[in-house]
Amino acid sequence: MITARSGVRLRVGNTDAEGRMAMVDSLCKMRERVEKENLPNAHLFTVATLTGHACIAAGDGYSICIDNSVARNEGHCYKLQEVGNAVGDPFEVSYLRKDDFDFNCGKVLGEDILQSNNAPSSRT
């Protein structure tokens, strides 16, 4: 069990899925900076391999992009997909679903979030 920068208590289920923990603290720090400095039109991005997810969802050799609701309203993934198509390195657009959030809800007293289950990384 660790506590993220945001104060969220996080149970680690798979140490091979550690990248998502590094990303959330970095995003939290940048969100704090955006708010503190009142930066207009801020767009925060993370880039990760998500190899297992990409292979299962789109097949070997394809890249995936996933927007949150704010980015989806701005069309970020579709813009990235257009650029990828133009240079011959296409992106498949994947979506966050309710199941994705339900999966990570805390399951036991004392945890807010389950970082991952203990299945192989591609199944987390």
Image: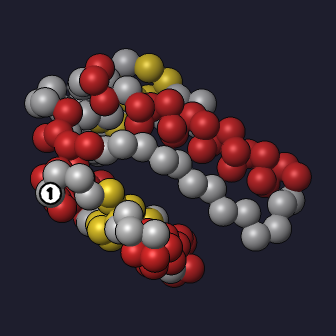
Quadrant location of the N terminus?
top left
- State whether residue 112 is above or below residue 96: above
Visible residue check, residue 63 = yes
Task: Return the residue at label 1.
Answer: 59
* Residue positioned most to the front: 88
Q: How crowded is mark 1: few (under 14 residues within 10 Å), some or many (20 or more)?
A: few
Element marked by disc 1: loop
Quadrant assignment, res 89: bottom left
Q: Residue at x 73, y 63 (%)?
A: 42
Q: 107 left or right of 46?
A: left
User: Percent from the top left, x then y, of residue 44?
Assistant: 63, 56
What residue is rendered at 78% in x and 46% in y? Answer: 33
Q: Residue 11: name its quadrant.
A: top left
Pick the front one: 17 or 113: 17
> Of all residues shown, which one is farthest toward the right?
37
Quadrant location of the C terminus in the rendered image: top left
Whether residue 81 appears in this view of the structure is no
Q: Position of residue 17 (x, y in %)?
A: 31, 30
Compared across the picture, whether 115 is left or right of 43 comes to: left
